[in-house]
Amino acid sequence: MSTNQLLEAHGKAALIFGAASGIGAAAAEAYASAGGQVMSADLAPQTPSSRVAPIECDVTDEASVGAAFAACVQQFGRIDAVVHSVGVPSVGPLASLSLADWRRVMDINLTSAFLVARAAWPHLKASGGAAVFVASTSGRNGGATATGPTYAASKGGMINLTRYLAREWAADGIRVNAVAPGPVMTPLMASVDPERRAAYAKALLTGRLIEAEELGAAIAFLLSDHARSITGAVLNQSGGLVLD
């Protein structure tokens, strides 16, 4: 099934944080290919295609996040969908982790989700829209030393933030969901040693790394009317690394 069958987005607008590359870029392309208007908010003011409008944004800065929402409304007149696809690994083990590194990763991964969610609420309430957060299997199974303790803790926090917001915002007509991918073939993964990448793939029941486009399609589905009865869900897209 093609992406435009999953999501009809003509006349709608999405603001996607972390859309310069990887999962965020795939989500931006999926929404744009279905006819939606998309703005990419990222530290790197670049986009996956000419169909996506870029804006520079520091997701850890409240004013910068607010400016991204203001720019999206100014350009498109509305916001129907918000995607938070931001995350960096930490460095384990815990004993070697500095407080500064803990705070840095928490700010980028989890505090930014709080800032985005708080800024998104009035816009999504007005449009009856939806939000999707990109979590991780590390938030469900405790993670591993390769991505570190802060990453696992922050993504676990994002999963419960998703569930909390689904309850709080239900009366406002807003749906909130998350995707929890396993190892995904992104530019960051491409920089990993080939032997390690092969080991990641072997750990999955499907025997291969997940493609970013698969996550983009899943996010498109969760934003679509096909998912209008789904809220508070954490979609397990881990290739069998985690079994529900």
Image (cartoon, rainbow, N blue to C red):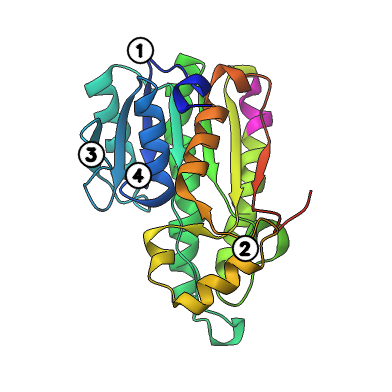
Categorize mark 3 by other alpha carbons within 10 Å: few (<14), some (14-19), many (20+): many
Q: Quadrant of residue 32?
A: top left
Left or right: residue 88 compared with residue 29:
right
Q: Going from the N terminus, do you reach mark 1 or mark 2 first?
A: 1
The residues tagged by marks 1 and 3 sit, at their Cα atoms, a distance apart of: 19 Å
Tell me whether the residue at label 2 lies in contact with that at label 3, contact meaning CB atoms closer than 8 angstroms.
no
Residue type, label 2 = Ala
Q: Give the residue pinned by disc 3.
A: 54
Q: Identify which residue, 114 or 148, lies in the foreground.
A: 148
Tell me whether the residue at label 4 lies in contact with that at label 3, contact meaning CB atoms closer than 8 angstroms.
no
Left or right: residue 241 compared with residue 113:
right
Q: In which quarter of the image is residue 175?
A: top right
Q: Write the residue at 62% across / 23% down.
A: 227
Mark 1, mark 2: which one is toward the viewer? 1
Q: Give the residue pinned by disc 1.
A: 11
Q: Going from the N terminus, do you reach mark 1 or mark 3 first?
A: 1
Residue type, label 3 = Pro
Q: Going from the N terminus, do you reach mark 4 or mark 2 first?
A: 4
* Circle 4: element type: loop
